[in-house]
Amino acid sequence: MSNPIARREWLKQSALAAFGLSFSFKSLGGEDYLPRYWGSEQGLLNLGSNENPYGLSPAAKQAIADMINSAHRYQYNIPSLQNFKKELATFYGVTPDHLLVTPGSGEALNLLARAYSQGDLVTANPTFGILPNTAKKIGVNVKEIALDGAKVHDLGAMMKAIDTKTSHVYICNPANPTGTVLKPAELRQFCQEASKQATVTIDEAYIDFLDAPYNESMVSLINDNKNIVIVRTFSKIHAMAGMRVGFVMAHPDTIKALAANHFNNANFCMSALSMTAAQASLKDLAHSKLSKEKNAAARDFTISELEKLGFRCTPSFTNFIFFNLRNYQGDFAKDMLAKNVLLRSSEQPDGKYCRVSVGTMEEMQSFIKLMKAVKA
Ligand SMILES: Cc1ncc(COP(=O)(O)O)c(C=O)c1O
């Protein structure tokens, strides 16, 4: 299909057919829901997966180029990678024994769902799907606690839901899909209390978008507490979603137990090119800072324009925005896909919502232009 317009139309039609009506948060199962066929290169405005639109850091690109001639070797035979875990540990103020590196943090979430599946899982609703959906798939009873009226985790209600049958608690902070954040002191207290009963997993995928005082990681708790697990990713602020680098930080005994179900360290299951990119990206603080600043500017613009159009936005601390669709009739995500825009929409108990990722300023201007024509 050489004609680009015909090709685009074909892709759009296949996308719609594949997507059907299931593009909501409710019907997600494992990672099966993840879209697989789209991208801006296919003419779509891709605001669906909370990716970082600014691309890999120049240092990461250079590191990949420098390593390309060693990529025929296994990772453990490449000298510059032998320090990967050590450098990661130093950056996060832990030791290599506190780390389990995984091909993307989704893989870590799957592993954790299985590792702590002896009893019930307590989590929020809505929340990021991979861990709870994997748990459901393997027969775990999942207690889903509604967010509070401000779309923030209801820690009091979650604590009440924890009982002797609970083996695992999952909190995504900042929260996906709502973009809200918990006060660090309150989350710390919750972790300490809940971890007396169950393993508490805190998914900090979006923490790098936060400013003080919210940007406090719960990693400080792992030294003295074997029941607290932190999950991180290079997919967001480091713009490495396609390169698949994530990691778990926990007490060395906890890591050892988890590693028994995994390849233990970054020596075998990780791509050499991804690790070298991650290593370089960690040191390129200027690039992370630029991504964070540009994201904040595009996010503030989008929220302010959506609010002017009468859409109520949940305050966002992340690189995506959760807003109420008022009286929109129909399937918003599907309708927007027909206009070449990829985003998520869902039905919540208090109405229909959209989650749109924050792209570049230009992309968000295009998005707002389309939103002006939306009848809701
Ligand atoms: C909260 C959260 N955790 C984890 C992930 C998975 O990221 P990855 O597997 O790319 O590291 C995502 C992806 O969007 C996410 O939103």
Image (tube, helix red, strand yellow):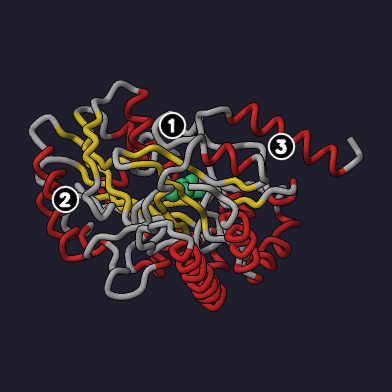
Across and down, in percent, residue 158 comes to 16, 44
* Contact flag, marks 3 and 1 (Cβ < 8 Å): no
N-terminal label among 3 and 1: 3
Image: 149 above or below 36:
below
Q: Label 1: which residue?
A: 28
Sequence-wise first label, 2 or 3:
3
Estimate how packed mark 3 is, as few (under 14), some (14 to 19) or many (20 or more) residues with alpha carbons within 10 Å.
many
Q: Which residue is mark 2?
A: 155
Position of residue 151 measured from the top left corner of the image (x, y, whole percent): 28, 52
Identified by mark 3, the residue type is Lys
Q: Is residue 370 left or right of residue 27?
A: right
As rendered, which of 123 and 65 lies closer to the eye? 123
Q: Mark 2–mark 3 contact, CB under 8 Å?
A: no
Q: Secondary structure at mark 1?
A: loop
Residue 313 in percent (x, y) is at 39, 58
Q: Which of the two residues, 56 or 357, is positioned nearer the viewer here?
A: 357
What distance separates the C-alpha of mark 3 from that of mark 1?
Answer: 22 Å
Q: Secondary structure at mark 3?
A: helix
State whether label 1 is within 8 Å of ligand 1. no
**Residue 168 as seen in the image, left or right of residue 285:** left
Q: Residue furthest bottom?
A: 286
**What is the distance, in whole Å, between disc 2 and disc 3 at their CAs?**
41 Å
How far apart marks 1 and 2 lie (CA) works out to 24 Å
**Among the 4 quarters of the image, the one containing residue 19:** top right
Mark 2 Cβ inside 8 Å of ligand 1: no
**Relative depth, front residue between 178 and 135:** 178
Specify the quadrant that holds the N terminus.
top right
Q: Amino acid at mark 2?
A: Leu
Badge 1 amino acid:
Leu
Which residue, given by chain and number where applicable, does mark 3 sit on?
12
Q: Residues within 10 Å of mark 2 (few under 14, many from 20)?
A: many
